[in-house]
Amino acid sequence: MLTSNTRNRLLTMACTVLFVGLTIASAGAQEVSQCTRTSYEAGNLWIVNSCSVPVTVKFTSDSGNTYGQTDIGADNRAMVSASGVGYEPRRDGDIYTFTCPRGSLPVLPDGSPWIPNNYRGRYHCQR
């Protein structure tokens, strides 16, 4: 049989664990922008994930003509534009990536999930 004091301690611990868990869950996920880079090879645009976690990446370009979203496995890469279709460096300029752990989405600082096609600013990850 638990004493009143022990019961109160267990209840307090359970409430603390629940509160901390809810706080972490509502805070969103951490950016993993250091995990991705672009690579332009033989007319194909790739986004390369060099981290050991799967990621979701939104990408945009200076021109706004090349943009989208893709999931990339851990230590893998994804072709996001094929030769002759889509991205052309001289026409479209630089590519900007917004990377989050898979299961979270890159969103604008105000929480909007719509990232303009030529956006290059700040973002955060939201579950």
Image (tube, helix red, strand yellow):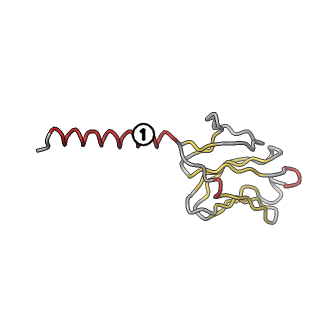
Q: Residue furthest left?
A: 1
The residue indicated by pointer 1 is 22
Q: Is residue 44 left or right of residue 69?
A: right
Image quadrant for the N terminus? top left
Residue at disc 1, secondary structure: helix
Residue beneath the point at 35% across and 43% down: 17
Q: Residue furthest right?
A: 90
Q: Relative to residue 82, is residue 104 depicted above or below?
A: above
Image location (x, y in percent) of residue 5: 18, 39
Dot 1 crowding, Cα within 10 Å, few <14, some 14–19, many 20+: few
Q: Relative to residue 119, is residue 50 depicted above or below?
A: below
Q: Quadrant of residue 113?
A: top right
Q: Relative to residue 44, is residue 94 depicted above or below?
A: above
Residue beneath the point at 66% across and 38% down: 108
Q: Relative to residue 81, is residue 64 depicted above or below?
A: above
Image location (x, y in percent) of residue 80: 72, 55
Q: Is residue 122 left or right of residue 27?
A: right
Q: Nearer the viewer, residue 85 or 60?
A: 60
Q: Is residue 53 left or right of residue 42?
A: left
Q: How many numbered tags mark residues here?
A: 1
Q: Quadrant of residue 23?
A: top left
Image location (x, y in percent) of residue 26: 48, 39
Q: Is residue 127 left or right of residue 46?
A: left
Image location (x, y in percent) of residue 2: 14, 43
Q: Nearer the viewer, residue 71 or 25?
A: 25
* Amino acid at the residue labelled 1: Leu
Residue beneath the point at 57% across and 57% down: 54
Q: Residue furthest front?
A: 5
Residue beneath the point at 81% across and 46% down: 62
